[in-house]
Amino acid sequence: MSTSSLSTSSDDELNSNRNPNPNTKPIDDELSLASITLTESNGNGSVNVNDQNACGQVEVDVEGPSSPTSSGYAGERGSSSEGTSNSRIDDDDEIREVINDDGFVDGVRDARAAPWMPGKRHVDEDDASISWRKRKKHFFILSHSGKPIYSRYGDEHKLAGFSATLQAIISFVENGGDRVKLVRAGNHQVVFLVKGPIYLVCISCTEEPYESLRGQLELLYGQMILILTKSVNRCFEKNPKFDMTPLLGGTDVVFSSLVHSFNWNPATFLHAYTCLPLAYATRQAAGAVLQDVADSGVLFALLMCKYKVVSLVGAQKASLHPDDMLLLSNFVMSSESFRTSESFSPICLPRYNPMAFLYAYVHYFDVDTYLMLLTTSSDAFYHLKDCRIRVETVLLKSNVLSEVQRSMLEGGMRVEDLPVDPLPRSYMSHRLSQHRLLTDSPERFRESTVGIGGPAGLWHFIYRSIYLDQYVSSEFSSPISSHQQQKRLYRAYQKLYSSMHDKGIGPHKTQFRRDENYALLCWVTQDFELYATFDPLADKALAIKICNRVCQWVKDVENEIFLQGASPFSW
Amino acid sequence: MGCSASLPDRNSVRSTGLNNAENGGSPDAKNLRVKLVLLGDSGVGKSCIVLRFVRGQFDPTSKVTVGASFLSQTIALQDSTTVKFEIWDTAGQERYAALAPLYYRGAAVAVIVYDITNPESFTKAQYWVKELQKHGSSDIVMALVGNKADLHENREVPAQDGIEYSENNGMFFIETSAKTADNINQLFEEIAKRLPRPSVS
């Protein structure tokens, strides 16, 4: 995979100090309160909407998000309820306050001090609350009749009027044979996703690209399907006014944990999974026993440590999509009851088969490490229980569980450890583990390197292997140490990712972007994608050299950081 | 990036019992093994009852059960028989109601729980009794449990209602408190006594 290399001579491909993302195109019309981007669902004509009032502007785009053209349309302000007030509250001081508050904290400043707490917060709020309106990122799920299903903040039942307004916007556009994708209102974006009778809406002033927000809505929908399957649509066929909230009872924690992960888990936009770093033999040992189990009629066997994969195996021809893995691990990790005892629960993998339930046997070996065995057979519990006992015995005997614990404590790749000079291969191939052996006290070692970062101002990187559907992310270290800085960096990566994958102007091969916070370098080849963050003052030519070295390093330790031979999952 | 390439799931709607062969008591008259299922509305304290019985713990922070949890506990009776309860603690959420047969099929004992401060949960308990009378094993031992008895000042379901309903339906009735551990062991001991004993040949 590292036969390709990024050279300084390709400078012409690198745009420095330029933002190639067309989504950040400023709205010219100062008077416009809202601009609406519409895309014709059949894609064959222009949208002709009657002039209603002159307070807005519509950008009509029938070919894709790349070249919005303006028409003199007057924005739809909807009914008089609070729901459409995004354009109006934008004029208020309180919103300006939020904007000044800076882009890395959703909602209010409490996220800055306190660690994230699971579960829904601010349930007492509704759309009349100033605090509710100030939240930077809202997520809503509602039914096509306008009934609320889920809201990130506030009580769903109190938001019935607001939901109805969102529904009105969607159906107004749909009645014209069209589909609303995005409404821009000042600093706010309102992103819509229609999935049959289920509507999903995100209202955000976080400046994330449309594609990212839409991807987040897709995941939110997938999480709902994981809990209920797509057959929930039938309830709406029978009764269009069906109230879905009771069916999702007790799942607030699952959704809020997913929404939280949009801030910190790169899997949510990379659509890839990541592995816990382990010695090749250790991962092989885990894989062998899981393979054993899979051969006895288990569809998927996954051994995970938090959000990282230790090993996973699927039955023949069965493939597991990284998004399904993300949604499944989020579901299991956010539902406390799985930790209490072994469980057997119906779950649906939306990418595998959105219509049917699978049955998941879940068992925690320790606080972080858990086994999931998925089957199509609803009476397989005792068989899966026996499988788990077999797996546990092997894992204990071969010290896999203690190795997993050790890896958790030690962490993964650190930019400080990037080999500075090319070293003999024999040494390189064990770089990751040798470093560990050399430093008896990793804590002390880490302290001594605080504030340094890697060579040439390298602060962080993410490497995504395209064939493996896996990524590896370096550990965070100073100066990107606080939760907020990490969140801001992920937002920057997200932006980079969607601009690299922009269908209108992309795909791109390389991008160099420098702003007051970082210099970001992205490099996409057939085999991998590399996202690297440097000190904003870093030298570009040097940064490119370092990126080549990172790729070499990843290749040298690939047996430890990736799950090899998992080809059934990435055909 | 892999999408699903595998067989559609044809078995998913089928819901046979959970390995019937393993349940319903072993032939050993001195060492019984029984499958027990807990049913009832969400939030009535099913998991708390089980955790109090199995681990002697009480955790006031509510943890919503997903699907069903499996725990086991063995008790010794005075006549030196032991009873191993294999307990299915089911989720009370509506979405799991259709899947309940998965867990109660083949169960020798059903413990139906309601919250004495919540009349709706009492109604829901009656629904479960009817469901089991229709679809459960014919010789199933059923217990009706009014939980949260420590909150007697908020009581909304009189004990008499529970007693009458259980008498009319041939059930055993008890009020418990998982919080104070009141009557928890008694519940399971009483169930153990009522189990049909296999005759020793």
Image: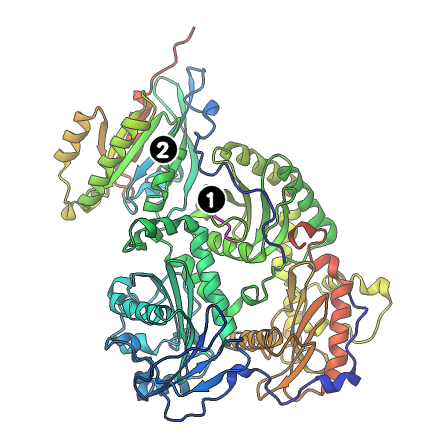
Residue at position x 38%, y 55% in the image: A251
Q: Using the rendered view, name the quadrant where residue A204 is placed.
A: bottom left
Q: Which mark is residue A357?
A: 1
Quadrant where the N terminus of chain A sits is bottom right
Say left or right for B160 vs A530.
left
Reading the image, the residue beneath label 2 is: B37
Tell me where residue A71 appears, x and y as whole percent.
43, 86
Q: Are marks 1 and 2 on the same chain?
A: no
Residue A468 part of the magenta-drawn span: no
Say left or right for B127 vs A59.
left
Q: Nearer the viewer, mark 1 or mark 2?
A: 1
Which is more toward the observer, B64 or A355? A355
Residue at position x 45%, y 43% in the image: A345
Which is more toward the observer, B45 or A322? A322
Tell me where residue A216 appears, x and y as whole percent.
48, 66
The amino acid sitting under disc 1 is Phe
Spot the residue most to the front: A45
Which is more toward the observer, A190 or A341? A190
Which is more toward the observer, A416 or B107? B107
The amino acid sitting under disc 2 is Val
Say left or right for A245 vs A429.
left
Q: CA distance from mark 1 to mark 2?
A: 22 Å
Q: Which residues are magenta?
A: A345-350
